[in-house]
Image (cartoon, rainbow, N blue to C red):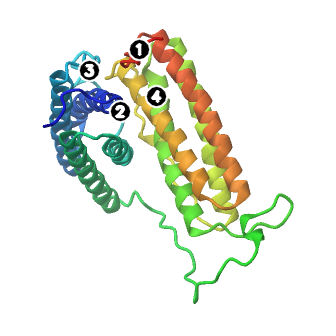
Amino acid sequence: MERSKLEPAEISNLWQSYVSDTMGIWVSRHFIATTKDKDIYKMLQLAEKFATEEAEQSKSFLIEAGEPLPQPFDEKDVNVNGEPLFTDNYVLLLKYSLAQAATTVFSLSLNTSTRPDIRRFYQKCIQNASEILNRCMDIMVNKRFVLPEIHIPTPNTIEKVNSQEYLGGWFTSKRPINAQEIGQIVYNFRATEIHKEFIRGAAQVTKSSDLKKHYQEGVEIFQKHLNEFQSILSQNGLPNLPSWDSEILETVTSPFSDRLIHYKHSALTSQAAARYGAALSSVMRKDIGVHFMRFMSETLVYGEDAANLMIKNNFLDQLPMAKEK
C-alpha cells in the first residue's frame, strides 16, 4: 500500500512542477495566440497540453497528501492576446532551452522520489519534455538555426594521454580544446545567449526600476561570459556562434506579469549555475575550468540578487520546513 504522506524531496519536486507547469500553460497560450509559424504553433499546442496534464497531476498529489498549494500562475499573469515581446524564432529557441532544462529537472525529481506513482509521473514528464525537445530541434534544423556546424579532425588512431601537460599549465603552451570541452562551451554559449535575450526583453517591458536594473546587470554579466566562450572557440580556429539580439521586438507593454518573468528568470539563473558547475567537473584544461568556476561564482551571486528581489516583491512562496528545535 502506497503511503499518503510525502517525503520532503517529493513535496519540493511537486511544488516546483505545479508552479512551473501552470506558468507553462499560460505562456504557451500567449505564444499560441501570437505565433504565425505553423510548425511552432503545433509544438506549442503540444507543450500546453503536456503542461496542463502535469499541473493537474502534481496538484492532485499535493492535495491528496494534505499539503498546501503554492500560488499558481493564471490568467492574471499573462495577457494571452497581448502584443508579443519575442519573434517566433526566439519563442522556438526559448522552448527548446526550457525543454533541455526540464529533462534535467525531471530526472532529478525522478531520482529523489520514492513513491512508485510519483516516480511513474516523473518518468512520463521526462518523456513529455523529450518530445518537445525533439520537435523543437527538428524545426531548428529545418530553419538552419543550428548552424554553423562544428567539426574537428577525425584521428587515425586513439592515443593515450602520456603527460600531465594535457591538463594545461599556467605558463606553458595550451593544447587544442578537446571534443568534450567544445561541447560544453557550445552548449553553455547557446543557453546563455537565450537567457541573456530573455532578460534583455524583460528589462525593456518591466515598470519596476529595481527589476530593470537587475536585468540590465544580468545582460552585462552574461555578455561577458559569451565573449569569453567565443574567444576560446576563435583561438582554436572554430567558428563564431550566432547571437539572437534581433529577435526581441519593440514592445513596451509586457504580456507577462513581473512575477512570471522574474520566476522564470530566477529558474534560468539557477540552471545556468548548475550548467557551469557540470562543465567545471568535466573539462580538463585548467584555464577553461577557471573560466567556468568564475562564471558559476558570478552567476550564484547574481542569483542571490534575484532571490532577494523575489522576496522584496512578495513573489516567493515558502516551502514547508522541518520543526523548529
Q: Is residue 201 left or right of residue 119?
A: right
Amino acid under label 3?
A: Pro
Give the Cα distance between marks 3 and 1.
26 Å
Give the Cα distance between marks 1 and 2.
16 Å
Q: Name the residue under label 4.
A: 266
Q: First in sequence: mark 3 or mark 4?
A: 3
Q: First in sequence: mark 1 or mark 2?
A: 2
Q: In this view, does 211 lie above or below 161?
A: above
Q: Nearer the viewer, residue 191 or 240?
A: 191
| Residue located at (29% from left, 18% from top) | 70
Image quarter of residue 66: top left
Q: Which of marks 3 and 1 is in front?
A: 1
Dots 3 and 4: beta carbons under 8 Å? Answer: no
Q: Name the residue under label 2.
A: 9
Dots 3 and 1: beta carbons under 8 Å? Answer: no
Q: Name the residue under label 3.
A: 72
